[in-house]
Image (spheres, rainbow, N blue to C red):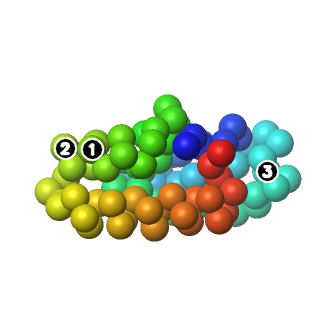
Amino acid sequence: MKIKEGFILREVAGSYLVVAVGKAVKEFGGVVNLNETGAFLWKLLEKSSTESEMVDALLSEYDVDRDTAEKDIKAFTDKLMEAKLVE
C-alpha cells in the first residue's frame, strides 16, 4: 500500500496536516489532520509499506501490544482507502 501521488504531509505549529497538491486538488478539496502516530504511519506509506511492516514499525517505535497495533493500523488504512488517499 502506498500514498497516492499528489498528497503531502506537513507539520504546522505542532499539527500534522495532509494536503492535496497538483491534480489531486480537483479530486480532494479538504485537509486531513493527523496525530503523531498517524503521521508516523503516513510516512511509512509514502515509501510503500504492507500492514505487517507497519505493525512491526509501530511496535518498535511505541509501547503498544501487537493486537492493538494491528487493529489501529487496519482502522487507519481503511479510512485512507475510503478517502481514496492510497493505492
Which is closer to the viewer, label 2 or label 1? Answer: 1
Which is closer to the viewer, label 1 or label 3? Answer: 1
In the picture of the structure, the residue carrying the numbered disc 2 is 60
Query: What residue appears at the point 46 percent right and 54 percent down from the top-left corner?
Result: 16
**Kind of residue at disc 2:** Ser
User: Horizontal and vertical percent for residue 58?
Assistant: 27, 49
User: Horizontal and vertical percent for residue 25?
Assistant: 79, 50
**Kind of residue at disc 3:** Val
Q: Are marks 2 and 1 in contact (CB under 8 Å)?
A: yes
Disc assigned to residue 56: 1
Q: Are marks 3 and 2 in contact (CB under 8 Å)?
A: no
In the picture of the structure, the residue carrying the numbered disc 3 is 25
Position of 33 relative to 11 (above/below): below
Q: Secondary structure at mark 2?
A: helix
**Disc nearer the start of the sequence (3/2):** 3
User: Horizontal and vertical percent for residue 35?
Assistant: 39, 61
Query: What residue appears at the point 46 percent right and 38 percent down from the top-left corner?
Result: 49
Q: Secondary structure at mark 3?
A: helix
Q: Is residue 77 among what the camera can see?
A: yes
In this rendering, position of residue 25 left or right of residue 11:
right
Q: Which is nearer the eye, 72 or 19?
A: 72
Query: What residue appears at the point 36 percent right and 41 percent down from the top-left corner?
Result: 53
Position of 68 relative to 41 (above/below): below
Task: Report how many numbered discs are placed on residues in the image.
Answer: 3
Disc assigned to residue 43: none
Q: How much space separates mark 3 and mark 2, taking CA atoms?
A: 35 Å
Q: Secondary structure at mark 1?
A: helix
**Kind of residue at disc 1:** Asp
Q: Quadrant of residue 22?
A: top right
Q: Quadrant of residue 13?
A: bottom left
